[in-house]
Image (cartoon, rainbow, N blue to C red):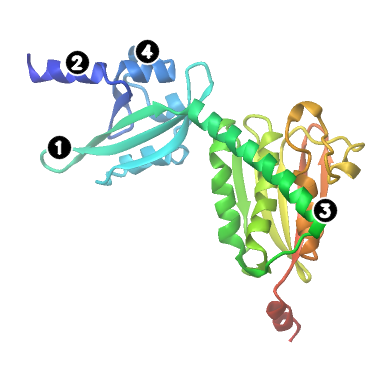
Amino acid sequence: MKKAQVYDTLIKNLPIGFSIIDKDGVIIDFNHAAEKITGYLKKEVIGKSHLNIFHGSSDETSCPLLAHVLLGRKESIAAETVIRRKDGEPVVISVTTAPLFDKNGSFTGGIEFFRDITEVKRLERERKNMSMQLSDFLDFSRFETKGCQPVLGPFEIESEVYKNIEAVRAEADVKGIHLSFDFPEKMAPVLDVDEMMINRVIRNLLVNAIKYTDAGGTVTVTLAEQNHDVLFEIANTGVGIDADHLPYIFDAFYRVSKSSGGSGLGLYIAKTIVEAHRGRIWAASTPGKGSTFSFTLPKRQVELTDSQQ
């Protein structure tokens, strides 16, 4: 059997997706597993742009993994990303990409090995949701009996907010939601807060924003200084909240929709934590357009002193 036949047989029967792109990002090989994962036949993608087929864009930034390969970098890279099937459904894949070079060292393209992990990620989200609900009930009981007692320490605002955004990016990608972060250059970089508690508030608001944002929408995190406070805003282009519900959404066990799931304690716990830090939390919403959840936290005492001098 010739080497070419061995190669064709091996690639054809690999249990994971396999594709080759040329130096321009055009697909030149595609195996059966890749067809099954993506819904595209090999003949439908050969000669087509990888970006246009799977990301609906010609912009390399829509797929950092592919951009990495097309830059001709020599190291391989592995990550999780989201592509679109032929039927438009999002698929979460675990992918490893590596550049290819000819005998003269010139960049010629890249290879990708990938597998569908959509179901794995769904089960992970369910596990996290169950864990979060259990944590909500335990914290509710603790706050009711002992109160909320923050343990203060330095909180680097920009890096912590960014980490929370990255933690929910996969969930946003599945729905095609764009995450935006606006951090002004000149503002207090550090707060004295309970890091775990404040991260929980930010994560809760981000998860809610993604949950109630339609596919293709936007979630924006904005930070600003407001006199002696730092203002956090998380806005989405989602379904919004009727005015009748707004006065009660921070009450324990209150849920706007019975079908939405959850413990009904997330916003109550967020309010309890923020107020224990001498901050405020509130929401504004326009049904059909989206909501903005805002909260403030006081600046560090040393920064307040410096600003008053």
Q: Separation of disc 3 and disc 2 at Cα?
A: 65 Å
Is the Cβ of the residue at disc 1 closer than 8 Å to that at disc 4? no
| Vertical comparison of 182 with 122: above or below | below
Q: Residue at x 40, y 16 (%)?
A: 36
* Residue type for callout 3: Glu
For residue 41, the mark is 4
Q: Which residue is mark 2?
A: 9
Labels 3 and 2: the sequence-earlier one: 2
Q: Separation of disc 4 and disc 2 at Cα?
A: 17 Å
- Rate crowding at label 1 as few (under 14), some (14 to 19) or many (20 or more) other CA atoms within 10 Å: few
Camera-near label (4 vs 3) is 3
Q: Residue at x 58, y 58 (%)?
A: 160
Q: Separation of disc 3 and disc 1 at Cα?
A: 67 Å
Residue 109, x across and y down, in percent: 26, 34
Labels 1 and 4: the sequence-earlier one: 4
- Quadrant of the image containing the C terminus: bottom right
Labels 2 and 1: the sequence-earlier one: 2
Camera-near label (3 vs 2) is 3
**Does the rendering let one see residue 254?**
yes
Q: Residue at x 30, y 26 (%)?
A: 19
